Amino acid sequence: MTHAVSLSAASATGTARRSWFGWFTLVFLVFSQVTAILISPPDRDMGDLQKIMYVHVPAAWMTMLAPLALLAFGVRYLFTHREEDDLLAAASGEVALVFAGLTLALGMIWGRPTWGVWWTWDPRLTSTLVLFLILAGYLSIRALIDDRDQRAQWSAAVGVLGAINVPIVYMSVRWWRTIHQIQSSPATVDPAYVIGLRLNAFAFLFVMIYFIRRRRDAFVLERAAEHAGEAAALGGLSRE
Amino acid sequence: MSLDTPMSLVTEAPRSEVAIEVTNLARRFGTSWVLRGIQLTVAPREVVGVLGANGSGKSTLLRILATLLRPHAGGARVCGHDVVREAHEVRSELGYLAHSPGLYEDLTARENLEFAARMLDRDAAEIDPVLTRVGLLGVAHRQVRGMSAGMQRRLAFGRLMLVRPRVLLLDEPYSNLDTDGIALVNELIAEWVDAGAAALVVLHELAPAEPVLDRTVVLVDGRFATPPLSLARSAR
Amino acid sequence: MSMRAEWRRARAIAWKDLTAERRSKAQFNGVLALALTILVMFGFALGPDAQAIGDAAAGAIWLAALFAGVLAFNRSYQTELDGGALEHLLLYPGSRRSILAGKLMANFAFVGAMLAVVVVAAIVLFHVQVPARWPALVGILFLGAVGLTTLGTFYAAIASRSRAREVLLPLLLFPMLVPVLLAAMEATKALLGGNAMSDAGAWARLLLVFDVIFLVATFLVFESVIEA
């Protein structure tokens, strides 16, 4: 049986801490974006379009990182069967999907003026698209299963397998594209851009952590309310 | 009890006093509770019937005891083993018969038993005596698809014979059976009980089971109600 | 439980699935017919120019196998669900992993047989030369089929017991199979076209790694997925 989250865990303890972290994240994000935009010179080919990299690239990095969180929490759930781990895994999956979507959208927005088309099967974007679909499958599973224990078990298994596949997908798509010779994503190694990218990488990391925790908190509250409702319907029978 | 009879219903002396013990068991489907705090004790060699309206939770109770569903509150023990934490041990003592016989329609009667024997580590020599006992030796080569519901239920009991259970969980075992079939089931239950097994039998009606029942419980609204009559243990 | 007993149970399950399959021939013949139909549809979509078709042969083979395979994977659990046999299957002693092993073997035989016929049909329909290195091709077919079957059998255990099962299996399976499909298609293309062996070799290694990783991973998590 999945060990339940208690109502107290969803209480105000830690909310103050989370608010502080939330404000810090927002401030740091704004600071990183503004700094990066101001200190970096326009790219000789792309001009100011290059600035989109400061959102696109960190988002892409988080798209690879969030599945790791999903993997960790999924594996932990399979061992501990704690509701908390299931909710953390779900939160990680959602956040990963959002970052994947963001990466794709920005990649296409950047690509249109640069290459003239919306999509070129660029290896990194293509892998991100596959990852997006894998995550969509993960969330579909969660939406389709009504029984809580079954949902937690099955989605943990699906999430873990999907997360394991991420590096393999990236590798195979890259090989596939090197065979068929294409142009690649913009170079990010130009030293003028490194500081901006590093700053924003951390900013986005904080954003990812913040949103995983926020979603987890929302799930915990929902779940606690469900438990309370069920206990009331049962008429005061204590849980084992 | 001879140990080299292939049909020996070998059950050792019970390791615990109680075969089935249910404490405050509760289970919900979605938001409504199907079982709301069940208390039940079944001793070895006891046959308990469970009556109740459709949807009263009888099958759910059986499936929890069979380790197929997890309780949402409370607990249960079968032969001293917890059904959630020691499910593996529970399964080795169990003989469960669901309402649908759970046979493979494209396989023949004999092949279904062959499969069961291989999964249970039983000798293939046990199959023919079992088929004879349940009266299906003549149609052993027939696909289950082509068998009547009554014959399928007999075959399901044949598979149960291969299991050699110490605890029987039977969900409406008499459905689709003619008088001979009902008599066969009661004989088998009596033999298993004599060998030390306990039985919990979900029933639609009391009549067919009367010869073997020790007592009855009635499920109403997810809880046990005391029945207006108690059945006297029939002479064996 | 001893490994020999587990292996025996897995073989019993594979035997049961294949025997049931043999009896109701409808399943294999139907799935094979579907695969061939899909192959023909690809021909219409891409042909009739010989060059275009020849290039597309590898892709068509694997996609036909994939789409038809989806039906095969769901059906392998259908027999358990129809008569309520799954519950009784779960109650036999021993580890539930033998269920996965048995179904894997049965599905692999099914998919392998289908793939063999599809390849022969593709060679005919798409004007492909039988490659001199056909043992290597068989190797790629084997590795690809293993990858396809492993994930297909695993996800079908979930999908066949969910709502929207027809949609859920492809939705879960196809993105996960991207590495297998890319590798198998590229390697098949390289071998059918008589190109340098090194291409196919690298892809074969990727297939092998994928197969090993996911065989292990699915076995490890199967227990969580087969319970009610």
Image: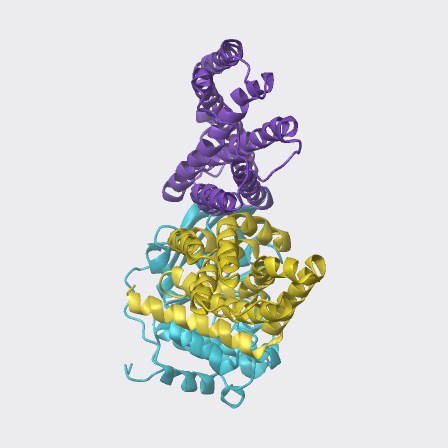
Chain colours: A purple, B cyan, C yellow
> In which quadrant of the rendered view does residue C23 lie?
bottom right
Nearer to us in this view, C54 or B38: C54
Location of residue C160 by image quarter: bottom right
| Number of marks in picture | 0
Relative to A191, say whether A6 is above or below: below
Give the quadrant of the N terminus of chain A: top left
Q: Give the quarter of the image for residue B92.
A: bottom left
Position of the C terminus of chain A by quadrant: top left
Residue at image location 47% in from the left, 18% down from the top: A200
Does residue B145 lie above or below B38 as drawn?
A: below
On the rendered structure, is C140 left or right of B43? right
Q: Is residue B100 visible?
A: no
- Taking the image as shown, residue A178 lies to the left or right of residue B198, namely right
Residue A190, image x, y percentages: 45, 21
The residue shown at (29%, 65%) is C3
| Image position, residue B158 (x, y; %) | 46, 78
A227 shown above or below B139 = above
Place of residue C173 in the rendered image (x, y in percent of width and height, measured from the top left): 54, 52
